Image (cartoon, coloured by chain):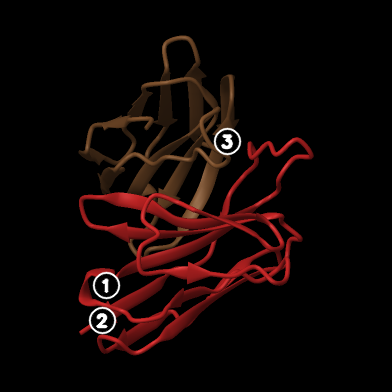
Chain colours: A brown, B red
Amino acid sequence: KNEVEQSPQNLTAQEGEFITINCSYSVGISALHWLQQHPGGGIVSLFMLSSGKKKHGRLIATINIQEKHSSLHITASHPRDSAVYICAPRYSGGGADGLTFGKGTHLIIQP
Amino acid sequence: EAQVTQNPRYLITVTGKKLTVTCSQNMNHEYMSWYRQDPGLGLRQIYYSMNVEVTDKGDVPEGYKVSRKEKRNFPLILESPSPNQTSLYFCASSLRGLAGDLSYEQYFGPGTRLTVT
């Protein structure tokens, strides 16, 4: 089964700081999702990527397939970015579904 | 508005009393899935469905049943709930490519918080 390691597990930062959350996985994948879960519990898909880099507003996601590593960056962080960020690689082969989840990074942005 | 809906949002029940959590999507997605989320364990897949009448077990299927009689609905059934099924449950859906490719954005429902006493 594909293993997913996220780091850090917890991160507290000041408003305006540049944030990086890392995700490493152990086998080949077809795509990787970054999800955001707010304190109320709802989950939103931020990115799905299979190569390179994607940007949406202040959020940037990158993936290096060869190194089995992805990062989520937040520029000019704001308290409303406080949430749990979950990395979810979908590994290829070995079964029809293949979506696995990291345990999440709990981010707190202080004003 | 494109969305996945779940009902109920909150449920407190007793051991052994059968219950159903409904999930419905209005995006004509082929793929639907159920997850449970527990502290320290993250999201774990219970069952998934690639299309109508096609369902398969995820990582933690014991104690759960599902059905997919219509494309839009994917109910989760707990025939005899037990306290270890107390959890936060999410339904999700996405498109599915012709070759079975699932590399599409996942849409999640708002979650159902279930407590079994």
Say which residue label 1 marks.
Answer: B86
Residue type for callout 2: Val
Residue type for callout 3: Met
Q: Specify whether A51 is left or right of A82.
A: right
Residue B16: where, in percent of width, then height?
29, 87
In the image, farthest residue toward the top: A66
Quarter of the image for residue A77 reads top left
Residue B53 visible from this viewpoint: yes
Question: Which of label 3 and label 1 is nearer to you?
Answer: 1
Mark 3 to mark 1: distance in Å?
Answer: 30 Å
**Proximity of marks 3 and 2: CB atoms separated by less than 8 Å:** no
Residue A31: where, in percent of width, then height?
56, 29
Say which residue label 2 marks.
Answer: B116
Residue type for callout 1: Thr
Say which residue label 3 marks.
Answer: A48
Tell me which residue sits at (71%, 56%) in the image.
B29
Q: Are marks 1 and 2 on the same chain?
A: yes
